[in-house]
DNA sequence: GCGACAG
DNA sequence: ATCTTGTCGC
């Protein structure tokens, strides 16, 4: 007669968190700026009356890598590159234990805190290399509620951001096969990128062949305070390989950092 | 109903 | 995200 089915306590809690997260995203999204809203210029050449120091120079990149032994141990990384030379001017790491799980659509609640802390540390110390623009390993508005990790960090740090996805997050009917079809289409064969138009007609970003002849695209979407057109241009100018340098350097150095820790047995 | 689903 | 070597080609 003991028929009371085991109350799924954990699912009740995670449902509550889930709703809180959605509310948070909806509130923060009201502050999102989706066009160019920065003081620097892209091409200072020939611009009448531009002031030196106003052009884009410091481009940041953030990424997180994980321990292979303990998936909750992670290394958040922030790098800043010179926009023109693509040389790394600054790097910083934060080794942390993450308590929040990865849930598709809620990546920011897992990864944003560490990355924001790295930005904050740089700003507090008035570091001259503080980024004028940040590229994020994860999507911007290409997200179920139009507010991915890049938007989240952009709004909370009040910084222009661009979202870079290495895989497509299925949104508004966009699928892997949709993109394959579009990129493979004859009329698009010469284009470097194609708009990601969902069933609703909304443009969520672009799929870009960042390297000549590369099959696997990257997915660019706006984060905060930047237009898609400008974002595309900047990504193109920072791509030596498939992934733009700020993201790639953050990724490489982040893995390197965590690998060295594991070598010294500091993780396990 | 089942599966898909950034990192 | 992470587990993983060599290998084919410019």
Image: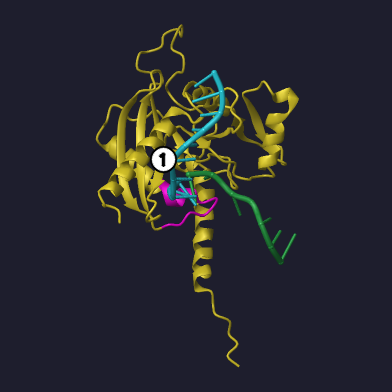
Chain colours: A yellow, B green, C cyan
Is A108 within the magenta?
yes
From this viewpoint, is residue A116 visible? no
The picture quadrant where one finds residue A200 is top right
Q: Nearer the viewer, residue A17 or A249?
A: A249
Instruction: Bin the neighbour count of mark 1 within 10 Å (Cα to Cα): few under 14, some 14-19, many 20 and up.
Output: many
Vertical comparison of A21 with A145: above or below:
below
Q: Quadrant of the N terminus of chain A?
A: bottom right
The picture quadrant where one finds residue A252 is top left
Residue at figure coordinates x 59%, y 32% from the top left: A217
Can you give x and y, in whole percent of width and height, for residue A35 in the image? Answer: 54, 29
Q: How many marks?
A: 1
Can you give x and y, in whole percent of width and height, for residue A80 in the image? Answer: 35, 29
From this viewpoint, is residue A260 visible? yes
Residue at figure coordinates x 53%, y 68% from the top left: A11
Q: Which chain is disc 1 placed on?
A: A
| Residue picked out by circle 1 | A63
Vertical comparison of A55 with A171: above or below:
above
Can you give x and y, in whole percent of width and height, for residue A64 in the image? Answer: 40, 44
The picture quadrant where one finds residue A62 is top left
Residue, far bottom: A1
**Left or right: A159, with A6 as reference point:** left
Residue at figure coordinates x 55%, y 24% from the top left: A211
Q: Nearer the viewer, residue A162 or A62?
A: A62
Residue, far right: A186
Can you give x and y, in whole percent of width and height, for residue A128 in the image? Answer: 28, 27
Task: Specify the segment rendered in magenta.
Answer: A100-112
């Amino acid at each position: 007669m003991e028929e009371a089915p085991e109350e799924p306590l954990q699912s009740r809690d995670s449902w509550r968190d889930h709703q809180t997260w959605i509310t948070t995203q909806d509130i923060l999204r009201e502050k999102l700026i989706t066009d160019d809203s920065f003081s620097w210029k892209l091409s200072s050449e020939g611009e009448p009356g531009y002031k030196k120091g106003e052009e884009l120079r410091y481009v940041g990149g953030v990424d997180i890598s994980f321990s292979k032994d303990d998936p909750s141990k992670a290394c958040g990384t922030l790098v800043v590159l010179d926009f023109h030379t693509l040389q790394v001017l600054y790097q910083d790491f934060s080794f942390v234990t993450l308590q929040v799980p990865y849930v598709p659509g809620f990546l920011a609640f897992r990864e944003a805190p560490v990355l924001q802390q790295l930005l904050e540390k740089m700003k507090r110390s008035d570091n001259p290399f503080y980024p004028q623009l940040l590229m994020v390993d994860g999507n911007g508005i290409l997200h179920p509620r139009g507010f991915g990790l890049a938007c989240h960090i952009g709004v909370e740090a009040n910084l222009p951001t661009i979202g870079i996805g290495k895989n497509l997050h299925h949104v508004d009917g966009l699928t892997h096969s949709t993109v394959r079809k579009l990129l493979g289409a004859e009329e698009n064969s010469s284009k470097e990128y194609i708009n990601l138009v969902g069933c609703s007609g909304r443009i969520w970003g672009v799929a870009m062949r960042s390297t000549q002849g590369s099959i696997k695209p990257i997915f660019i979407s706006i984060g905060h305070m930047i237009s898609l057109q400008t974002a595309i241009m900047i990504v193109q100018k920072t791509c030596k390989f498939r992934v733009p340098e700020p993201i790639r350097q953050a990724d490489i150095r982040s893995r390197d950092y965590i690998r060295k820790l594991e070598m010294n047995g500091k993780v396990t």
